[in-house]
Image: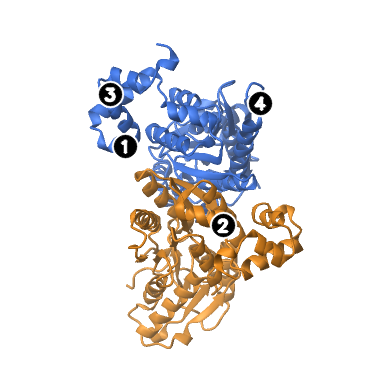
Chain colours: A blue, B orange
Amino acid sequence: MAKHDIGFAAVARLAGVSNATVSNTLNRPEIVAPATRERVLAAIEELDFVPNRAAATLRQGTNRLIGLVIPDIANPFYSAIARGVTEAAAEHGYTVALCVSHDDPHLELRHFEMLAEHRAAGALVAPLTADASRLAQLRRVGSRLVLMDRTAPEGTGCSVAIDDVHGGELAVAHLLASPAPASDRSIVLVNGDLAIPQCADRREGARNAFIAAGLDPDDLREVTVDEMTVDSGRIAGRRIAAETPRPTGVFCTNDQLALGVIRGLNDGGLAVPDEVSVVGYGDLALAADGRVPLTTVEQPKDELGRVAVEILLAELGADRAAHEHVTRTLEPHLVVRESAPLPA
Amino acid sequence: MAKHDIGFAAVARLAGVSNATVSNTLNRPEIVAPATRERVLAAIEELDFVPNRAAATLRQGTNRLIGLVIPDIANPFYSAIARGVTEAAAEHGYTVALCVSHDDPHLELRHFEMLAEHRAAGALVAPLTADASRLAQLRRVGSRLVLMDRTAPEGTGCSVAIDDVHGGELAVAHLLASPAPASDRSIVLVNGDLAIPQCADRREGARNAFIAAGLDPDDLREVTVDEMTVDSGRIAGRRIAAETPRPTGVFCTNDQLALGVIRGLNDGGLAVPDEVSVVGYGDLALAADGRVPLTTVEQPKDELGRVAVEILLAELGADRAAHEHVTRTLEPHLVVRESAPLPA
């Protein structure tokens, strides 16, 4: 089946439903029976279907409106990105349409439909999970799209990301840096689901730091949590406090986990940083003001938002044939506070 | 001069500049000389001028787009409101245009211009400072506007606010509640600028709690800070620790101040809560995870955003002649944690 032939009708035929049901599944899924909805979504996936109107107008939209598609606006990482995006957009006379996806691919598509209705000039998208078919689908919606906090595979589109491998390496190199031999150190990584690319990258960086210190990366002890929250961190911290040998340092792949781990270690009778050092990731507002001010990896969140807008506007201004995709990587840096001080 | 006669030309005449300069002052102020800009803004104010296009289309806009105009998206209070707004808007098929005003009336006007260009159906606005002429100006831009975190004067428009007087009373009543006689208690209020209505309201509530306990409200000791930040709180806390008589309780009108005050009290040798209790306001994420988990007043931020959307959509659906302005007030509640525990 030729690509241009894929439309509502083809999806409807494959799913054995009416065109209206396809439309409802995309636009008002709550009124479609779950089993029917699943059939339609399976057909959409099988056919690589993108609603035509969204595809057409996101490629052609001329309004000074930029879509910002993020998983959660109350998460301080994304609200800091949103600040950078809104400021850069306003400087260029653009308005930002805030689209919260809850990291749900179907909600994401509905947002694209709405952006298309408003003839948005393009969109900045931060997908949380790494599903390749989803990224491919987003790219088909329009090349006027910049991926944020994720590197687009070469030649597929524009993106701006933070070098989380380097960030993970900075964190663990700090925990290994001490006058004592690195081999006396025992480091625990507290991490989320490795399907989240940021978690995988930070872990890779942690292992790189072991290799750089002449250690076996498999000696990095790992604790995986279901949710990267303060509560999960606290449970992990209690567990770590009970383990032998006692760790000398804990690297948590976000600040919420780190705050929880500090509490859990304290619950288990271990003092931070006197007995164990803890490093977080993200440098959220709460990092500086916790029970023990947190050593953490600061990500240039505002800059990420600003750069995403600049890349998109450059793409809008460019001759389409001449446009070359831009892949930018921003560098994080270590902020040293009390939870893991500099070696004496 | 009749209202309909007020336009760019009238502003230009009064300011002694060209129409183009008036337009530039509103749309690209950075290219207008500061002195000229001031003249144009003074003329705008004197004439009660609202750019026609914005006024016209915000009253007539039909796109499923809602403007959300807030001072700062990285502030967790506003990002929580934004979450409620985006969720409620998405449920009704509306997109949210995120407009960050930095509490600058001129930026606010530029955002309204842009919302008008996009034919937004209406706007939700959270102005930080209380200037009456500014609220009047916003109302003239369009009645399709809902004030957030502020009560609109009767008959002037729709609004949804949080009862901060009640919130202040809850906080101080808690600090006064103890088996010991209330008259033995010494309470300090750490507050921001009283020109901010929320600061004035929380203070009024604090005084009400004194009256309800049979105390003289003028016995409430007050410390005013320039900025409601952790750093300002810390300085205030050190000062309070050095004062005689030593306070038994401190009420801070936001959580950032409270976290700083706890540190400052600790710096001055006072333990929280053993020697002094501290209550914050806002229940931000950092409140629960600070050095001492914070007793604070929780504001229904998500609900505020949701209710604002519902009020606006009801107004859009209503017959204009039949519409009656809606004023909603939401109730905060006290969250008791370690910094000010329940009386034994």
- Amino acid at dot 3: Arg
Tell me which corner region of the image, top left, top right, bottom left or bottom right, holds residue A129: top left
Q: What is the number of the mark on residue A319? A: 4
Say which residue label 1 marks: A28
The span from disc 1 to disc 4 (Cα, nearest Å) is 37 Å
Mark 2 burial class by Cα count in 10 Å: few <14, some 14-19, many 20+: some
The span from disc 4 to disc 2 (Cα, nearest Å) is 35 Å
Q: What is the number of the mark on residue B52? A: 2
Dot in front, 1 or 2: 2
Residue A170 in sight here: no
Residue A25 in sight here: yes
Q: Earlier in the sequence, mark 1 or mark 3?
A: 1
Task: Say above or below: A148 vs B333.
Answer: above
Total numbered circles: 4
Mark 4 lies on a secondary structure that is: loop
Q: Which residue: 57% across, 61% down?
A: B50
Left or right: residue B40 versus residue B133 is right
Mark 3 lies on a secondary structure that is: helix
Dot in front, 4 or 2: 2
Q: Are marks 1 and 2 on the same chain?
A: no
Task: Say above or below: A206 vs A231.
Answer: above
Q: What is the number of the mark on residue A39? A: 3
Q: Chain of mark 3?
A: A
Are discs 1 and 3 less than 8 Å apart at CB?
A: no
- Amino acid at dot 4: Asp
